[in-house]
Image (spheres, rainbow, N blue to C red):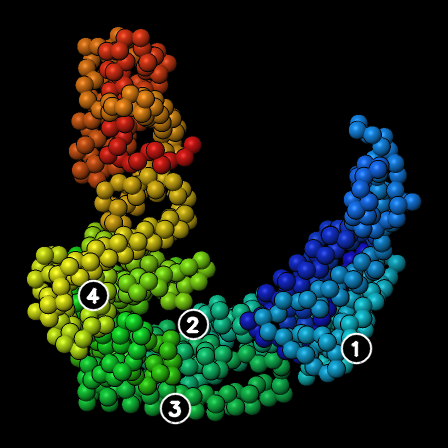
Amino acid sequence: MPDMLLELFSEEIPARMQARAAADLKKLVTDGLVEAGLTYASAGAFSTPRRLVLTIEGLLAESKPVREERKGPKVGAPEAALQGFLRSTGLTQDQLQIRDDKKGQVYFAVMEKPGRSAPNIIAGVLEHAIRNFPWPKSMRWGAGSLRWVRPLHSILCILSAEDGAQVVPVTIDHLQSGNTTEGHRFMAPGRFAVTGFDDYCTKLRRAFVMLDPAEREAAIWQDAQNQAFASGLEVVPDAGLLTEVAGLVEWPVVLLGRIGKDFLGLPPEVLQTSMKEHQKFFSVRNPKTGRIEGFVTVANRETADHGATILAGNNKVLSARLSDAKFFWENDLRTVAAKGLDGMGAGLASVTFHNKLGSQADRVQRIAALAREIAPMVDADPDLAEQAARVAKADLQSAMVGEFPELQGTMGGYYARAAGLPDAVADACKAHYSPLGPTDDVPSDPVSIAVALADKIDTLTGFWAIDEKPTGSKDPYALRRAALGVIRLVLGNGMRLPLKMSLFKAVFGHSFETWLQSKTVGANQAIDGLAELGYGKTLDAMKEAMSAEAKSLGLKAVDEKLTSAMTAADSLLTFFHDRLKVFLRDEGIRHDIIDACIAMPGNDDLTLLVNRARALNGFITSEDGTNLLQGFKRANNILTQAETKDGVEYSYGADIKFAETDAERALFAALDTAETTIKPAMEAEDFATAMAELAKLRAPIDAFFEAVQVNADSEVIRRNRLNLLHRIRAACAPVADLTKIEG
């Protein structure tokens, strides 16, 4: 069974595309071979900046012959039916067979396809794969029609077996496959022939090419750590940068450089960002001071001076980049010293956040009011929370963030400290965007929590108020991420936030202000009144706080806005519940268990909801829980059918004196005990105790259904037993809506 080696050799492939391209090549070719009847034992794909490589072991030498029989129309059927069958099979009428069938004679087509040789199949599969390769971006060059990410120079494709290797003939435009490749562009120019994958790997390494990207990553990281350690320093880990750099070189040569003394005073995040974004350098840190003092660059070749010339050139470019960063930093500090952080952010009034939601300054005002309301719920100082929210976005007007947008928030923390603001305010400026992703740290300082929640809730409620919700896979304003951020903030800090009321008030603020702006110029007074309103009032107080101008527009209109805001808040809470299902799915909690908890009162308290769901999940997945669920559903189904049939509700009057069996009396006693324990346990949110008590009902419920016929002949006994079933339903009701659990 031969092995196949394929190499597509081109100009440099962008690093970000290499891993996906290798995987796509493997899938396209192996799927095509299997579909053509050519199976294999194993396959592996590799990439370097200049080549995509696929190796397949244990290929069949040829595909197996295929015989297919297909039943057609009856003899004597309309001509159109017969012609359609002939077209589908590719045969002529005299090639069909006539066979006896249950309903008469029928045409049969017998199609035999002989086996095809591996080279024949591979050539066709490769041409299709190469011409239809799914590059994110591709180009044409020369006079050919082929599109590739960069000009494709050669195709190596060979089949190797014990008796030698043969070239698989593939022709695409001007390219003809062969058995030769090239090594390193500078260190080993010129082509050489190979006879198989092992020979290919050996000769590539001699030609200064590391084929496996994982090997290049490991070599870069190990050498970088060793050089840094020898200098008493450490490399700052960056997995994404490591993967990218490994995709830029075929023969990695690690070089350690030092940052000029003039730049050591810059914040470490500035140094890291500038070196990573502009130069693809790793940052090197002094472990004693935490200061960034050096960098690691990865060259693509060895040199006679051991990289001295390369380092000198990189240092020259880096100094120019860091000089710019230093200018931005010092200029921003002068602005803060002269105007304060409020002065730096004054320009936000002319920066549009969204044409229906006002400017960034308008948004800051809303976030500040909301942060002040949230602060007491997270044990934060309301004044500090409001102060932090008012300056948290100021760094968006800084020169540094203008150059490096990814430093927003981080620079705000530095500028807040430079302005002499409290540490809690500076920390909130830095942390209020967090958490940005599922692995991002969750802020734990109370002021940071308040501002981070206010920022995300304002975003969500604003876009809900103008009906800009995520649809399908489209989420241009990252609202799913914002909702997940709120969930992680609440759960990560064990907060008991009445989310629905906060959402409602925020949506109302957005929608009412937008409504007023659509009215006459005289409504400006009403808008000012709304700005002073804040979020801490009851609904009645909110109405009273409206200015005389707003009232003159009609209380009915205000009421309509209140109703509309409540509807939007309900919709947004459902959105949170959907995000919560995704979040808890990673814990193995099924959606139906979460639905059973969402159906309970207080479902806008996410901490309470998750605690209930986790406890219910543990209970339902136990043997007692599973069996109790079956007993509950049986009781509920019988009771529901009886209530529908009789037109009454059996919810009162179960009396033990009408019990005829020991099983009935035992169930009465068990329910009496359970009810006295479950109610106080649920009031104390002791879900484990409540569900443990429910588990004790399993045996008496099972025994009841084994020994008792609910629909007895006596109407009195029947009603009593139905009311007893209601007690089962009522005992479970405080825990969760078990009717929503599947199975």
Foreground disc of the pair 1, 4: 4
Closer mark to the observer between disc 4 and disc 2: 4
> Comparing marks 2 and 1, which lies closer to the viewer?
1
Among the two numbered marks 1 and 4 on one chain, the one whose residue lies closer to the N terminus: 1
Q: Position of residue 632 (x, y in %)?
A: 33, 26
Hey, what amino acid is under mark 2?
Answer: Val
User: Measuring 82% from the left and 65% from the top, which residue is drawn there?
Assistant: 168
Q: CA distance from mark 3 to mark 4?
A: 48 Å
Q: Nearer the viewer, mark 3 or mark 1?
A: 1
Q: SS of the residue at dot 4?
A: helix
The tag earlier along the polypeptide, 3 or 1, is 1
Q: Position of residue 228 (x, y in %)?
A: 46, 75
- Under circle 1, the secondary element is loop
Residue picked out by circle 3: 323
Q: Judge whether 25 appears above or below 80 on screen.
A: below
Q: Secondary structure at mark 3?
A: helix
Residue that lies at the very extreme toward the right in this rendered image: 94
- Label disc, if present, on residue 183 of the rendered structure: none
Q: Nearer the viewer, mark 3 or mark 4?
A: 4
Q: Which residue sits at x=30%, y=55%?
A: 572
Disc 4 marks which residue?
512
Residue 174 numbered tag: 1
Residue at 17% x, 33% y is 680
**Circle nearer the N terminus (3, 4):** 3
